[in-house]
Amino acid sequence: MNFYVMTLFPDMVLNGLRTSITGRAMERGILNIEAINIRDYTLDRHLHVDDAPYGGGAGMVMQPEPIWRAYEALRERIGRKPRVLYMTPQGQVFRQEIARQLSGEEDLVFLCGHYEGVDERVLEMIVTDYLSIGDYVLTGGELPAMVMIDCISRLVPGVLNNQDSAEIESFHDNLLEYPQYTRPETFMGRRVPEVLLSGHHANIDMWRRQQSLRRTAERRPDLLTGANLTAEDRAFLKTCCLDQTEKKSL
Ligand code: 9D3
């Protein structure tokens, strides 16, 4: 899969993604992540890429021409019209379901804005999707693009190892994960829960399910609405955390 990030800060994006799992996938040729420096496409002799807003107001607006020229060069090189995702706090909030859909594309272009924004005309001409990562204010679209690339990458076949990939497929019921423990059995006086040392797999599975249910009720009660709960699950929730279950009318 090919990711193209149109940005004024190409090093920021590449330095962040060449580490860890995405970096390994790039080395192995499963992912191609390119940063396209918008400044390389300016025709301004001082290499300016922004100017004051028409109508007045504070700050600077990114000009349409360098962005359009960068896009056209890319479109000609790859020989097709890719989906172009504009990173903007005004976009649809990115979720796992959107990542799943986008992971089916061969090419994705991320357009990162800075300053007070991007000239509206070039957005109308090239953008196919407007996406945000949540309701808080950042300084630009680079971190959102990196977040989305990280998230989409792990859905691309071959990027994760087999064991981690299997987890993506498995049915998680919209619940939070149960707590994990490893050696030693006692750490600063705290024991690992006895059931996990028992070797009794049915009991371990039940304990883990109950931990997931309790944890979700306590930390993310909003998720329980969409969870696929058995009669046994509901009965357990009533005994362990009545407050939350009443709220969600289980
Ligand atoms: C003139 C600046 N703002 C008015 C309050 C609007 C604004 C525009 C651009 C605020 C921040 C930014 C920079 N942010 C992004 O480009 C961005 C972003 C974000 O800030 N939060 C969540 N998702 C995203 S995606 C792109």
Image: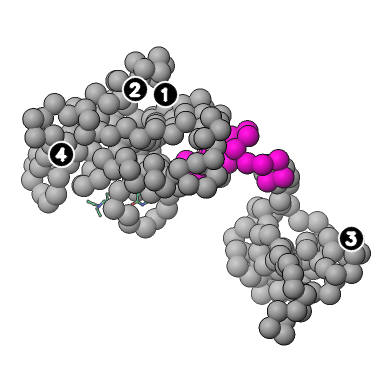
Q: Mark 3 Cα within 10 Å, few/some/many (few <14, many 20+)?
A: few
As shown in the figure, which amino acid type bears the numbered disc 3?
A: His
Q: Which residues are magenta?
A: 149-164
* Secondary structure beneath label 4: strand
Closest to the observer, 109 or 124: 109
Q: Is residue 1 left or right of residue 162?
A: left
Pointer 3 residue = 201
Pointer 1 residue = 82
The image shows residue 158 at horizontal and vertical percentages of 63, 34
The image shows residue 63 at horizontal and vertical percentages of 17, 34
Disc 4, disc 1: CB below 8 Å? no
* Quarter of the view holding residue 204: bottom right
How far apart in space, not on screen, are marks 4 and 1 (Cα)? 25 Å
Disc 2, disc 3: CB below 8 Å? no
Q: Which numbered tag is attached to residue 74?
A: 2
Residue 20 in sight in this render: yes
Residue beneath the point at 13% across and 26% down: 43
How far apart in space, not on screen, are marks 3 and 1 (Cα)? 49 Å
Residue beneath the point at 56% across and 33% down: 28
As shown in the figure, which amino acid type bears the numbered disc 2?
A: Leu
* Secondary structure beneath label 1: loop
Disc 2, disc 1: CB below 8 Å? yes
Q: Mark 1 Cα within 10 Å, few/some/many (few <14, many 20+)?
A: some
Q: Is residue 157 magenta?
A: yes
Ligand 1 is within 8 Å of the C-beta of the residue at disc 4: no
Is 96 rendered above or below residue 138? above
Disc with the residue nearer the chain's start (2 vs 1): 2
Residue beneath the point at 68% across and 59% down: 177
